[in-house]
Each structure stands twice: as C-alpha cells, then as structure tokens.
Amino acid sequence: MEREAEGLFAISKAGHDKGSIYVVVREEENYFFVADGKNKLLENPKKKNKKHIQIINKKAIEAIADEIQGNTKVLTENEQIKRAIKLYR
C-alpha cells in the first residue's frame, strides 16, 4: 500500500536539478508535482517522474509550524515552502 506523499519533503535523484530539495504538492499515477517556493512555485509546480524522486518521511509544514505560530507576519504558501526547505537544510 502506497502512502500519501503530499506535503512531504523530496530530493531529486535525476535531471539537471539532481540533489534539489522540494515539497510534494500533488501526486498522480507516475508523477509527483513538486515546488520549492522560489523557482518552482505552487501555482506552477515541476512535474517529476516518481522514479526520479526520493521521498523524505517528514512533512514540510511540521518544519515551520512553531515559527508560523509565533510569527505575526503572514507568509504566503510559497514563502512557507521556501522557509520549510531552508529550515530542513
């Protein structure tokens, strides 16, 4: 049984973006759609073959949950993704 990957961190294993960290925003049969909040935004995610992505079993929102709660500044979803990736590194 395959687990739900949306919202999890992922690392690109192939392509010109090899080693890049993303957040999975959508999943289809053979593809993940990923965003990094900087170059690939939530509105236009990158389509990656499932074979070319390594899923990291950690939710992106958990990485910044405490910071969001303590922060009065409202972050857009893309800023949240970018911040979560920065904190993960």
Image: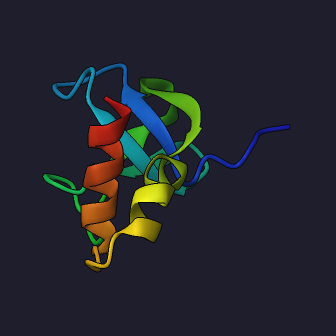
**Measuring 33% from the left and 39% from the top, which residue is drawn there?**
87
Using the image as rendered, state which of residue 21 and residue 87 is in the foreground: 87
**Residue 78 or residue 41, whichever sits in front:** 78
Q: Position of residue 79 (x, y in %)?
A: 24, 64
Q: Quadrant of residue 27?
A: bottom right
**What's the residue at 41%, 67% (across, down)?**
70
In this rendering, the answer to whether 38 lies above or below 72 is above
Q: How many marks?
A: 0
Is residue 88 left or right of 7 when viewed as pictured?
left
Q: In the displayed structure, would residue 65 be above or below residue 84?
A: below
Residue 86: image quadrant is top left
Q: How far from the left and from the top, in percent, is residue 67?
A: 40, 58
**Residue 46 in sight in this render:** no
Front one among 13 and 63: 63
Task: State the residue lying farthest toward the right.
Answer: 1
Give how far across and how far down residue 61 sits, in percent.
50, 56
Q: Which image quadrant: the N terminus?
A: top right
User: Which residue shows up at 28% across the image and 52% down it?
Assistant: 83
Q: Where's residue 30, x and y in %? A: 55, 42
Colouring style: rainbow
Q: Can residue 45 be seen in this view?
A: yes
Q: In this view, does 8 lie to the left or right of 75?
A: right
Quarter occupied by the C terminus? top left
The structure residue drawn at horizontal position 31% and vertical position 20%, both measured from the top left corner, is 14
Q: Looking at this rendering, what residue extends furthest in the front direction?
A: 70
